[in-house]
Image: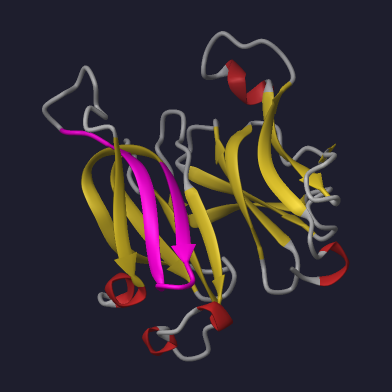
Amino acid sequence: RHGEHAGRLLCPSRTQIGEYTDWTKIRECVYNNAVYSDDHGMTWKTANCVQVGTGEGTLIERGDGSILYNSRAYFRDGKRYLAVSRDGGATYGEFSVDEFLLEEMRIGCNASFLRVELEDIEEVQFLPEGAKDLVVFCNPRSEIRNRMTACVSFDSGEHYREAKVIFEGPCAYSSLDYDRNTGHFYLLYEKGTEQDDANPYAEGLNIAEFDLEWLMQEI
């Protein structure tokens, strides 16, 4: 939507560059990247490597037109790994680790990442003064896969606050969307019970629907 790359379609992806037999070896054999199209999806190009050892990432376009890539990683340190693109998602650099967003310690987990511009938010009165935008990040905020949590940022993902625990029990992959017409968020996620160790996500896919007022009421 911004600058010379306006209209570009950009999708996160993962590449395998070798064989692995365990979760230690995998960090040497995979990396995140992206695919992008400048002709409405007729043809696609592959972006450069984000960082070796990352997988299942998600990305947003920030207000200045840069792309912030937020990755699951296989380093067993409970951290999310970041990269920035300033050419519309074709190449990445400025690698860093987010010290606030927590990750499952064993092999990490897929997460959701969404940015909403102020012009698309009707209930801006619920945002803090000086907010540049609203970024919502959802994942199991725990050393294991439970406690599905929404964290929010008001400066394009530079700083976060924990906003809401959506579900306390076992949970895993998620996908977040925002309806500009209703002002509601929709989180699709894997949900389970503590009693079913054999199938921790026995309740299957669930949807949580919430609005900005609910998301912000404890901040």
Question: Residue 188: x percent and y percent?
Answer: 37, 46
Question: Position of 169 compared to 152: left or right?
Answer: left
Q: In this rendering, is residue 161 above or below 78? A: below
Visible residue check, residue 132:
no
Residue 97 visible in this rendered orientation of the protein: yes
Estimate the x, y position of residue 138 in percent, counting from the top left: 41, 53
In the image: residue 211, left or right of residue 39 = left
Depth check, front residue: 89 or 7: 7
* Count of picture labels: 0
> From what the image shows, is residue 99 above or below residue 159?
above
Residue 185 included in the magenta stretch of the image: yes
Residue drawn where x is 81% and y is 61% of the image: 86
Is the stretch drawn in magenta largely helix, strand or loop? strand
Q: In this view, does 45 lie to the left or right of 210?
A: right
Q: Nearer the viewer, residue 198 or 79?
A: 198
Q: Nearer the viewer, residue 67 or 107?
A: 67
| Point 27% across, 72% down: residue | 214
Splitting the image into 4 quarters, where does residue 41 fall? top right
Identify which residue is drawn at 29% across, 63% down. 164
Q: In this view, does 70 lie above or below 119?
A: above
Magenta segment: 174-193
In the rendered image, the quadrant that contains the N terminus is bottom right
Quarter the C terminus occupies: bottom left
x then y, percent, for residue 162: 36, 64
Residue 107: image x %, image y %? Answer: 46, 29
Q: Which residue is drawn at 15% across and 24% down?
A: 196
**In this view, which residue lies farthest toward the left?**
195
Colour pattern:
secondary structure
Tell me if residue 25 comes above or below residue 181 in the rendering.
above
Extreme-right residue of the structure: 4
